[in-house]
Amino acid sequence: MVSKTPRRLAILGVGLMGGSFALALRQVAPHMHIAGYDRDEVNLAAARQLGVIDLGSVDLASVVREADMVLMAVPVGQMPELFELMAPHLNPVAVVTDVGSTKTSLVEAARKYLGPAVARFVPGHPIAGAELSGVRAAQEGLFQGRTVVLTPLEETLPHPLAWVQSCWELCGARVECQTVARHDEIFGVVSHLPHLLSFALVYEIAQRPDAATLFRFAASGFRDFTRIAGSNPEMWRDISLANRDVLKVELVRYRDQLDQLMAWLDTADGAALEDFMQKARTARRQWQEGS
């Protein structure tokens, strides 16, 4: 019988998400060996100093070779290359999982490069994060009480799925399963679209000649709406491109709503505006009360 936690865990991308996963599992398995791969040697040194990993290397093969579980925690745009590079060096029984925010293109890459090992690939997406990034932002309680969505494939074997689910539960998370397509639809609406809109608003204002004056008067409403525009641009570039088919549909829907707002303003239709705002307010309150 396999233990609930890996004997040797490999973290590919030792930042906020990968580091927090390692720290959480260390709480229940202090003797587990954790190796980290990262392109940044300074980041690896910091991870070792903080006790997040036992061994760090820029050599991918040496990190994954003896691991019985591999967690991919790099931007989604980097994952296909990692699949290709690590496939020849994977432990024959290793389970592979990830923390990426999109799944469709990732699964295509896994099927292309992992070969038979795709049966031990369990795509995952923890619904957690922080404004800060990097291993110094990692925290053992990041996933406590949060939801992790797993999107097992038709090929995924029962044991890898159960093992990855168990590890996330040991991190304090609740686990749900979705299909790959439904996952990308849901998060395109409630995560990826809001990020693009937040970036777009800040960018548009920043291009104006009087941007400095406008930002000087911006207060809590602007801060709340644009908080996520402070997110990692590389990560959100990759997410936007990976889920672009869903995002294009959602942007058209949002543009249609903006057109409707413009029409109500043109006709000074206060009743329609108030009804629209009231329905939005009620929906948000219901969401908050149910979350």
Image (cartoon, helix red, strand yellow):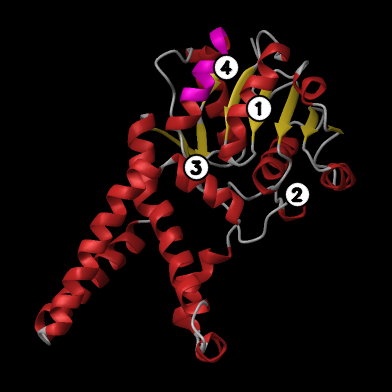
Name the N-terminal-most of marks 4 and 1. 1
What amino acid is labelled 2 in the image?
Val
- Residue 52 percent across, percent down from the top left: 80, 41
Q: How many C-alpha atoms fall within 10 Å of the one at disc 2: few (<14), some, or many (≥20)? A: many
Q: Is residue 247 visible?
A: yes
Residue 83 picture quarter: top right
Residue at the disc numbered 1 = 82
Separation of residues labelled 2 and 3 (CA atoms): 19 Å
Name the N-terminal-most of marks 2 and 1. 1
Residue 39 picture quarter: top right
- Residue 193 percent across, percent down from the top left: 39, 55
Looking at the image, is mark 2 or mark 4 nearer the viewer? 4
Looking at the image, is mark 2 or mark 1 nearer the viewer? 1
Secondary structure state at the residue bearing disc 1: helix
Query: Which residue corresponds to the image point at 57% horizontal and 22% vertical from the top-left?
Result: 163
Query: Which residue corresponds to the image point at 58% horizontal and 15% vertical from the top-left?
Result: 114
Secondary structure state at the residue bearing disc 3: loop
Name the N-terminal-most of marks 1 and 3. 1
- Residue 132 percent across, percent down from the top left: 66, 60
Separation of residues labelled 2 and 4 (CA atoms): 28 Å
Q: Front-most of 151 and 233?
A: 233
Query: Which residue corresponds to the image point at 72% horizontal and 33% vertical from the top-left?
Result: 11
Residue 252 picture quarter: bottom left
Looking at the image, is mark 4 or mark 3 nearer the viewer? 4
- Residue 244 percent across, percent down from the top left: 39, 44
Residue at the disc numbered 2 = 135
Q: Magenta residues, as a range? A: 108-116
Q: How many C-alpha atoms fall within 10 Å of the one at disc 4: few (<14), some, or many (≥20)? A: many
Q: In the rendered structure, are the residues bearing label 2 and label 4 in contact, judged by CB atoms less than 8 Å apart?
A: no
Residue at the disc numbered 3 = 101
Instruction: Say the numbered circle drawn on residue 113.
Output: 4
